[in-house]
Image (spheres, helix red, strand yellow):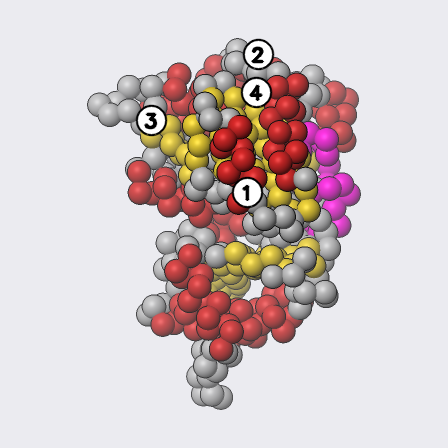
Amino acid sequence: MSDTLMVSVSGMRGIVGKDLTPELVARHAAALGSWAAGQGRPSVVVGRDARTSGPMFLRAATAGLMSVGVEVIDVGVVPTPTLQLAVEHHHAGAGLMLTASHNPVEWNALKLVGPDGIFLDGDSGAAVRALADRGAPRAGWDRIGTVREDGEAIARHLDQVLGLPVIDVDRIRARQFHVALDCVRGAGGTSIPPLLEALGCRVSAINLEADGRFPRPPEPLPEHLGDLSKLVRDSGADLGMAVDPDVDRLALVDERGEPIGEDYTLAFAVRAVLGAAGNGAEPATVVVNLSTSLVVEDAAKEFGARFLRAPVGEAHVARMIRDEGAVIGGEGNGGVILPAVHIGRDAPIGVALILQLLAWSGKSVSELVGAAPRYHIVKAKAPRGVDLAPAYQALRKRFADATADDRDGLRLSWPDRWVHLRPSGTEPIIRFIAEAPTRRDAEELIEACRSLLR
């Protein structure tokens, strides 16, 4: 792993032309195809987001897959969750999504999906990497793979969202919501506008062109949503919605033009699902990651749900959702996972659930935020290169009264606050995240971590 080539169990990402090259993509695509064929399913679904390097890498990946004799099913420019659903729909052996998600425009990546529609786990990912390292066996002239296109993947995805029992389409349509939308010129322009229109919304939109030329930093953080906030105010919209380039994360802006933070996306989705479910014989289960806000935990506990945390990373959360039979889960970065559709972060599902909650409650976004306990999250980062083990040990000693979780870095928690220190899996940095009732309290927790790294 170099400074700009990040390798994880479910893929790799890097800077285009520096570490991530067509040759590397073709090699790893061939390995994925060979692995899928070895599992008895010689077909792979491929898709991409709107990045300018996408067409180049799609051709490289397709060549690599064909070279090992598998069938390539090309779904085009789609959200990542659309590709995951397409893998299940086609009973394919694997999926390959070409997207660097929220990373800046100069990055791209390979996300490797298993036949269950979930990103590859450690063992499967290691098997694919081993094939890539030694070179997958190539097909002769008479066994070269084929390519076919699937242009209906997005339509199938949206139909599944609209058909969910938890979504009262007629009730949402009756509200005639006015939604301001920012798709950051990523794949969201292919999917979110038709979904909103199907739900009877009036849409005021910016950055719908799916050309990958991001007009702002693509991660939908509050500090990046100034244009969307202005659009909400200028258009008089009921709320604003922003997605990241591969449409697995959703962020919200309230009716006053104030970004409310991505954790509220999942908190609202949890309220929509648990409120519709009512009181069952057994408490429902909600699964999130270790860095997800307490506002989500509060929402789950309000309905008496069992609340579990998994290590950071969609694959970890997805597998705990599956293993624990959770009704909903996700990540505090705006990633909603509803296993009734599939076990992957899905912004279109988030869009529908948010509108369902607004229609059901009759409240505005700001009223929903104001009704919940408030916390302050502070995030920071530092360059990687420091041995974290001594810092973890020192933090445990300094905060001996905290509950410690070392499954993913170190998370120290108290009833009303927590701090999480971990190496990033997507960038060459160390991440610090803290949450507390006041910003000052959260900043003090971050500074305690920083001081022990110096």
Q: Which residues are magenta?
A: 205-225
> Helix, strand or loop at disc 4?
strand
* Residue depicted at 43% across the width and 42% down the height: 407
> Helix, strand or loop at disc 2?
helix
Disc 1 from disc 4: Cα separation: 25 Å
The C terminus lies in quadrant: top right
Disc 1 from disc 3: Cα separation: 34 Å
Residue 436: give its label: 4
> Helix, strand or loop at disc 3?
strand
Which amino acid type is marked by label 4? Ala
Q: Earlier in the sequence, mark 2 or mark 4?
A: 2
- The percent position of residue 130, horizontal first and vertical second, equals 46, 70
The N terminus lies in quadrant: bottom right
Q: Which residue is mark 2?
A: 370
Q: Earlier in the sequence, mark 1 or mark 3?
A: 3
How many numbered marks, from 0 up?
4
Q: Which residue is mark 3?
A: 306
* Residue depicted at 55% across the width and 73% down the height: 27
Q: Which residue is mark 1?
A: 390
